[in-house]
Image (cartoon, rainbow, N blue to C red):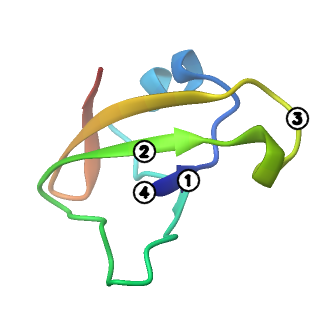
Amino acid sequence: MMLVHYKSKKELTKATGEPLKYTETSMFGDEYRENGSFVVARRPHLQGGGREFFAEVTMQDGLIKSVS
């Protein structure tokens, strides 16, 4: 699962149309795809402060297309 650098799901949703700010955490290879969907998370105990959330992000041409 990838960690995203947004304080809330609302902030992530507002970033639609922009590149995703993230950190890869998988030791089995990159999960990020320029085109497609994947699950991301914010983990306060790893990233410091804020609320924990999970979201499905859909990317198109390297930009956030939608967040659910």
Up-down relation of residue 48 to residue 35 (above or below): above
Mark number for residue 40? Answer: 2
57 sits left or right of 3 in the view: left
> x%, y% of residue 39?
33, 43
Quadrant showing the C terminus = top left
Q: Residue at x 44, y 83 (%)?
A: 27
Discs 4, 3 touching: Cβ within 8 Å? no
Residue at mark 1: 3
Q: Neighbour class for label 2 at 10 Å: few (<14), some, many (≥20)?
A: many
Question: For the residues marked 3 and 2, what is the alpha-carbon distance in whole angstroms?
Answer: 17 Å
Q: Earlier in the sequence, mark 4 or mark 3?
A: 4
Q: Earlier in the sequence, mark 3 or mark 1?
A: 1
Up-down relation of residue 12 to residue 22 (above or below): above
Q: Earlier in the sequence, mark 1 or mark 2?
A: 1
Q: Amino acid at mark 4?
A: Met
Q: Nearer the viewer, residue 26 or 8?
A: 26
Mark number for residue 49? Answer: 3
Residue at mark 4: 1
Q: Amino acid at mark 2?
A: Val
Discs 3, 2 touching: Cβ within 8 Å? no
Quadrant showing the N terminus = bottom left
Question: For the residues marked 1 and 4, what is the alpha-carbon distance in whole angstroms?
Answer: 7 Å
Q: Amino acid at mark 3?
A: Gly
Q: Neighbour class for label 3 at 10 Å: few (<14), some, many (≥20)?
A: few
Discs 1, 4 touching: Cβ within 8 Å? yes
Up-down relation of residue 20 to residue 27 (above or below): above
